[in-house]
Image (cartoon, helix red, strand yellow):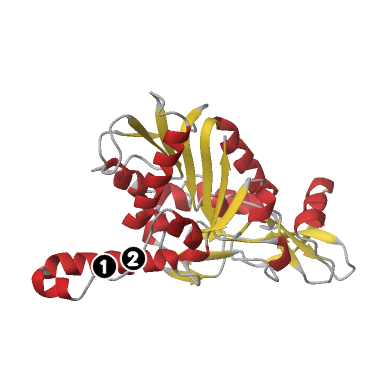
Amino acid sequence: MTGFEPWRPAVERALYGPGGFYRRELPSHHFTTSARAPAFADAVARLADEVDERLGRPEDFTIVDVGAGGGDLLAGLAGLLDERVRLVAVELRPRPRGLPERIAWRHDLPERVEGLLIACELLDNVPCDIAVVDDEGRLRYEEVDRRGRTRPGADVGDEDAKWLAEWWPIRHPGERAEIGAPRDAVWRDLAGRVARGTVLAVDYGHLREARPAGGTMTAFRDGREVPAVPDGSCDLTANVAVDAVGADHLELQGEALRALGASAERPPLALAYRAPTEYAMALARASATARLLDPAGLGAHWWMRTDR
């Protein structure tokens, strides 16, 4: 036993295996997520209302949050949407205390959804293999051990080589690329469960014409970026090749949120004298919204969307 294995099984074990990172930890404890911002919940509520109207206000309209974390997004939606709308969280961890009772909590995906299915920062945590070009120009899987050391492994299989040729071609010795086929498969599975409505994934990502040299595999712990070591101690993430996923529509988060009415406009200063508490709350909200819209930060997330 050498201790080396391809990245995909290594990440699968480190994140989701017994005692894995996501069996123990919440994403919000380690990095900033869009789902916790009130303005994000407001925008999703408006999107849900648009979808609901398009479907003719059916009796059974459901919002499913896949990879719900601590349930922050659905908790925000619970205060914005009427009781007719069912709210369902899909998450590996046990149900947190204090969530509104109307939020259903489950560990598996529903077979059929009529409404809105959203996966916020899920695809980047779907384990994938990494390919590397060796000194002879051969495509090989990169292997990693539990200390984060890497080496070239077996030759890349035909299907993965085909994916790379189409979506992330690498040819020169030392070049690396994350093979996004497992993320594409997860998207197809999610989209296939939406009988009528909209499926939306929100994530860091990149396009074919601007793939990051060397790939994006990294890790986070306690709010800091750390080396990618698949030992279960950190969140392991790699950006998504969003154009390969197969969504009908791609849009940067900042643009999508503005289209749904999000604004980072600061409250008038006069409010500070008339109602200082209200002013402070409005200012904090504007600051949080600005972070969501920031093109150098969360605003650069991609919205991958398909309507049915």
In this view, which residue lies farthest toward the right? 136
Per the model, the C-alpha gap separating discs 2 and 1 is 6 Å
Using the image, tell me which numbered label, if any, was put on residue 288. 2
Residue 259 location (% of width, % of height): 46, 56
Front one among 92 and 246: 246
Residue 249 location (% of width, % of height): 61, 49
Left or right of 285 in this view: 259: right
Tell me which residue sits at (39%, 51%) in the image.
43
Crowdedness of circle 2 by 10 Å Cα count: few (<14), some, many (20+)?
A: some
Residue 167 location (% of width, % of height): 75, 56
Tell me which residue sits at (71%, 54%) in the image.
179
Asked whether the residues under the numbered discs 2 and 1 touch, taking CB atoms below 8 Å apart as contact, a structural biologist would say yes
Q: Secondary structure under badge 1?
A: helix
Front one among 141 and 205: 205
Using the image, tell me which numbered label, if any, was put on residue 284. 1
Residue 70 location (% of width, % of height): 35, 48
Image quadrant where one finds the C terminus: top right
